[in-house]
Image (cartoon, helix red, strand yellow):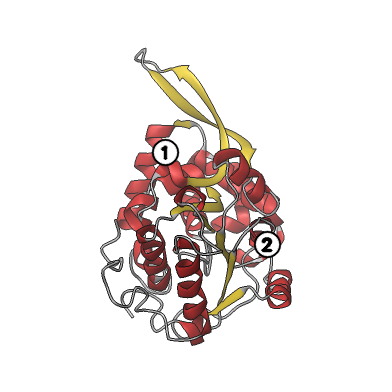
Amino acid sequence: MNPNAGSPAQSDPLPSWNNGASKQAIIEYVAKVTREGGPDFMRPEERIATFDNDGTLWCEQPVPVQFAFALDRLKALASAHPEWKETQPFKAALEGDLKTLAQSGERGLVDVVVATHAGMTTEEFQRIVKDWFASARDLRFKCEYSAVVYQPMIELLTYLRANGFKTFIVSGGGIEFMYAFAERVYGIPPEQVVGSSCVTQFMMGPDGKPVLMREAKINFVDDGSGKPVAIYRYIGRRPILAFGNSDSDLPMLQWTAAGAGARFMGLIHHTDAEREYAYERAVLGSLNKALDEAHAHGWTVVDMKRDWKRVFAFD
């Protein structure tokens, strides 16, 4: 469990949130769906809360954390792949040309991730990811990546769990990558992580012991319209609360909103260039459609600059 997580025993369960409409909406929603005998009561098994990860639970700029990992892996493997120096999108990645890399679109980013995440067992991959987290540092804040989680969202996760919610990550990021930190950083165990995945095969290793081998093929992309599909497939219940931060999260929010009973849809709006970043366009995709829908339907838009007393625990 993240040591910065707030205690549910606190009189204010969300101390890093400013007193305003967003905080009030969250507290009022939790109160009404947990009030036994009330018209909006939801049984504990129905209290499913889903959260996007990048840009919703932790910082995704200037590149998402998993992509920073992929870039470092690409450089470490480059000597065995001289062809990458002349082949896009690998050439741009090795040269740190993020503009050209972004222009390659989702396909280019997937190519880089696949090339750096495959050809090893699941145990080997977990070890590599954990070793990387131990030494890697955020490009702007020069701290461990586990320190650039949003303190207000850590408090929200804790508050929801204290009120009988089961919290899930539903991210376009790799599920196996998130296994390495989700429980330690967010208190969310691996079985409550939903993400993109590569093809994995069971086989016998050289020592005669069974292993799971990661192949250079995408199995499922948990992004955009894939998110509701993955929620149904892996969770089996429609969320009653969902948070995202971009258009790629819109289908998850729409599917949550379409359910019966009281629903809560939250959208993180990055408006604080001083403490974090101010943007409406992530590495891939924008926030325009999601913002329009949020305003049209009265969803909660969390303005980072206005609604959060602090962004990170170190603020």
Q: The N terminus lies in which quarter of the figure?
A: bottom left
Give coordinates of residue 73: x percent, y percent: 46, 48
Q: Nearer the viewer, residue 302 or 118?
A: 302
Which residue shows up at 35% across the image and 71% down it? 142
Q: Nearer the viewer, residue 60 or 50?
A: 50
Kind of residue at badge 1:
Phe
Q: Secondary structure at mark 1?
A: helix
Q: Are marks 1 and 2 in contact (CB under 8 Å)?
A: no
Q: Nearer the viewer, residue 293 or 161?
A: 161
Which residue shows up at 56% across the image and 61% down it? 242
Give coordinates of residue 24: x percent, y percent: 48, 80
Which residue shows up at 71% across the image and 62% down it? 103
Give coordinates of residue 298: x percent, y percent: 66, 76
Report whether 271 appears left or right of 152.
Answer: right
CA neighbours of label 2 inside 10 A, class few (<14), some (14 to 19), many (20+)? many
Report whether 228 appears left or right of 10.
Answer: right
- Spatial CA distance of label 1 from label 2 is 31 Å
Identify the residue position indicated by label 2 in the image. 250
Splitting the image into 4 quarters, where does residue 247 fall?
bottom right
Kind of residue at badge 2:
Leu
Report whether 114 appears left or right of 87.
Answer: left
Identify the residue position indicated by label 1 in the image. 125
Which residue shows up at 52% across the image and 61% down it? 54
- Compared to residue 76, the image places residue 103 above or below, namely below
- Compared to residue 99, the image places residue 302 above or below, namely below
CA neighbours of label 1 inside 10 A, class few (<14), some (14 to 19), many (20+)? some
Asked if one can make out residue 76 in the rendered structure from this viewpoint, the answer is no
